[in-house]
Amino acid sequence: MIQRIDKLALELPVPKHANANGAAAVQELLGGKFGEMSTLMNYTFQSFNFRGRKEMRPFYDLIANIAAEEFGHIEAVAYTINLLLTGSTKRGTDPSSTPLKDATDFRNANHFNFSGQAALPMDSMGHFWTGAHVVATGNLKMDLLHNFFLECGARAQKIRVYEMVDDETSRAMLGYLLVRGGVHIVAYAKALEKLTGVDVGKLLPIPDISNKRFPEAKKHEAKGLHQILYRFSPNDYKRITEIWTGAHPEDGSPLRVEDGPPEGFDPPELPSEPQLTAPIGPDIDPEMFKDVAKKLFG
Ligand code: MN
Ligand code: MN
C-alpha cells in the first residue's frame, strides 16, 4: 500500500510568463524513456516481483523505498508543466474569439486537445509513455545495473532540458531532481558494490559534469540534501541503512538515512481556464450548481 501526502517535495515558484513550448520540452522528464514515470514503474514492478527477498532484504528495501520517492518526482514535474501552461492561451468564455489560436503554433497541441492545459503521460514529442520502458528481469544484478543506467540517463535528460529552458519553475524543479536523482545513482552504485564488490563510484559522475555547476542544485547540496536517503514509510524498509552507508563517492561526505519523507511544501494553486471549460464552462446553471453544493455540503 502507499500513503499519499498533499505536499510537493520542493517549493515551486510560479513562472512570470506562460511557456507552452518549455512545457513541451519538460514533458520528456515526465513521460520520456528516462522520465520519472519510467523510474517509478521500473522500481515499482521490480519491488512487486522481487523473489527471495528474505535473503536479499536490503536490496528489496532499497528498490521499494526509492519507488515511493519517484511518485513525488512525477508530481513535481507535472506541476512544473501545469504552471508553464497556465495562461498560455487567451483566458475567457467566448469561443468565437478563437481563444486557443496560439495552440496551433505550440509544439504539443495535445496539452489543449486532451487535457485542461496540463501535463500528460507522454514525452517531449507527444509519444505516450509505454510499459516497454519497464525492465524488471528478476535478476538482481541485471536490474540494479539497469537502474544505475536509468538514473544516469535520467540525469543526462535533466541536464539537456536545463539547457533548453531558463524559467525559474523548471530550473527549481531541475535543481532539486538533479540532486535527488544523484542520490539514486549513488544508491544503486552502492547496491552493486555490496552485491559484487565492483567499484562503481569510480565512474561517477555520469554524464561527467558536477551538480555543483547548476546553481539550483548546488544550493541543495550545500545543505547536504545529496547525503540523505529518505525512508518513505512509517515502519518498513529499515534495512536501506545497510546499503546507504559510508561516504559520498564525489565529495566524501557521510551518507545518512532520514526517517520519513521530506516535510514538503503546499502545491501551487492552478487557476481555472474557462476557454477549456476547465474545470467548468460558462453555461453550467448556477442555480443547479448551488443546489448540488447544498446537497453535498449542507
Ligand atoms: Mn526521480
Ligand atoms: Mn530516481
Image (spheres, rainbow, N blue to C red):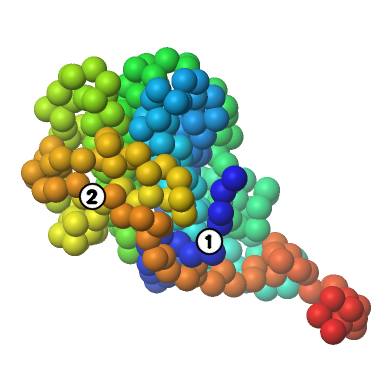
Q: In this view, does 171 lie above or below 209?
A: below
Q: Disc 1 marks which residue? A: 5
Q: Which residue is drawn at 14% across and 48% down?
A: 254
Q: Quadrant of the N terminus?
A: top right
131 or 110: nearer the viewer: 131
Which dot marks residue 96? none
Front-lying residue, 20 or 261? 261
Position in image of residue 80 (x %, y %): 45, 58
Residue 17 locus on image (x, y percent):
42, 68
**Residue 256 badge:** 2
On the question of residue 134 being in view, the answer is no
Q: Residues within 10 Å of mark 2 (few under 14, many from 20)?
A: some
Residue 52 visible at all:
yes
Asked which quadrant contains residue 222, the reply is: bottom left
Residue type (three-letter) at the residue carrying disc 1 = Ile
User: What's the residue type where badge 2 is placed?
Assistant: Arg
> What element does badge 2 sit on?
strand
Name the residue nearer the viewer: 166 or 93: 166
